[in-house]
Image (tube, rainbow, N blue to C red):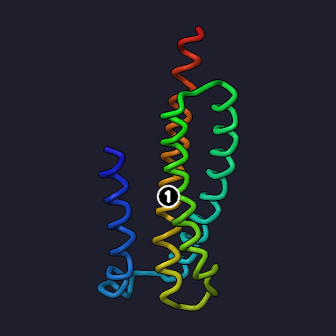
Amino acid sequence: MRKAAAFLAIMMVALVPLAGVAGAATWDYKSFIKQSVAWYYLYQDKEETFNELYNLSVQMNVSNETLQLALELYSNATTEYDQALAYGLPSDGRSLGWIVFSVHIRKAYIYVSEAVEVLEEALKELEAQAA
């Protein structure tokens, strides 16, 4: 289900530029830029949460399979993040760089969010077992 939601989100991101061309009168490029920057900061926040949860998970002896899955998702996130930053934080002008940046930074956010969810679920299970 999450993969389907992620796929739909990615497709929406990919089609945003086309929607802007079709409805140029209603599409605001500055809003698009603000949303892209917001995804950047949301990613950074989730990455911090991931690091805290990962360290806690290691201390709480979460299974290696769960830790590996979380690390794989985090690795995918950092790969997407690096691809986004390869374009730099694009300037405020209208450029293709913003579109490519936005696609990759949103993917990075989705991956790191999934990694956080995996760790949160594992910790909840451990808490339930301890109770």
Q: Where the N terminus falls, by quadrant?
A: top left
Give x and y (percent) for residue 99.
Answer: 47, 80
Question: 100 or 67, which is in the foreground?
Answer: 67
Q: Where the C terminus falls, by quadrant?
A: top right
Q: Is residue 3 above or below residue 23?
A: above
Give x and y (percent) for residue 18.
Answer: 32, 82
Residue that numbered label 1 is attached to:
76
Q: Is residue 55 left or right of residue 4?
A: right
Question: 113 or 12, which is in the foreground?
Answer: 113
Give x and y (percent) for residue 43.
Answer: 60, 58
Residue drawn at point x = 49 percent, y = 54 percent: 111
Q: Is residue 19 above or below residue 108?
A: below
Q: Residues within 10 Å of mark 1 (few under 14, many from 20)?
A: some
User: Hey, what amino acid is under mark 1?
Assistant: Asn
Residue drawn at point x = 48 percent, y = 42 percent: 69
- Under circle 1, the secondary element is helix
Q: Based on the displayed image, in which of its 4 quarters is residue 57 positioned?
A: top right
Question: 35 or 70, which is in the foreground?
Answer: 70
